[in-house]
Image (cartoon, grey):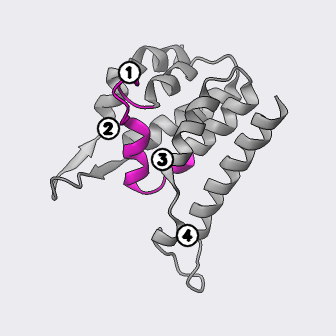
Amino acid sequence: PILPGIGSWTLSNLVEGIFQQSNHGKNGGKSSEYSSSDEIEMSTLLPVLRRLLRMADAEVLSYTCWTLSHLCDGPSSHIAEVVTSKDPKAPKGGLVPRLVELLVHPSWRVTKPALRTIGNIVCAECSDENNQGTTTDYTEVILECNAVPRLKELVT
């Protein structure tokens, strides 16, 4: 599929570019923090990524997983939105169940960015906006989505 392929590639590069720009010296070569002016409209982006993750094309899946990897390497608010869902009908764990499924995809071009995204989620500590001073560890979400057996398949 040409349009989803181009669209997923574009999203991946746009999201990566936002974070590279904010990490590599907007302020005269000094490292700078993520800026609210770079805010990504997650409520618009996530449904698109959810649809792209359901496609069969390995190239689309790869670029979509890279987009999620870049998002989960950014602000904690992005990670929180990737691992949760506001839709009560959606599966628990947001997009994580599909990422876990993709760990055993036949193409390493899909497996690698799916693994990277899960790694970014596990390594992150997200502060809870409702309960200041506490952090949320999303490792439990990854475990609840049965990632361990899939990870074991990767190394055997």
Q: CA distance from mark 1 to mark 3?
A: 23 Å
Q: Which residue is mark 2?
A: 138
Q: Which residue is mark 1?
A: 145
Q: CA distance from mark 1 to mark 2?
A: 11 Å
Amino acid at the residue labelled 3: Ser
Q: Secondary structure at mark 4?
A: helix
Q: CA distance from mark 2 to mark 3?
A: 20 Å
What residue do we see at 31% from left, 49% from top?
A: 125
Q: CA distance from mark 2 to mark 4?
A: 25 Å
Q: Which residues are magenta?
A: 69-94
Q: CA distance from mark 4 to mark 3?
A: 21 Å
Tell us which disc is closer to us: 1 or 3. 3
Is 133 covered by the magenta stretch?
no
Sooner in the amino-acid sequence: mark 1 or mark 2? 2
| Image-quadrant location for residue 57 | top right
Amino acid at the residue labelled 2: Tyr
Amino acid at the residue labelled 1: Cys
Amino acid at the residue labelled 4: Ser
| Image-quadrant location for residue 5 | top right
Circle 1 residues within 10 Å: few <14, some 14–19, many ≥20:
some
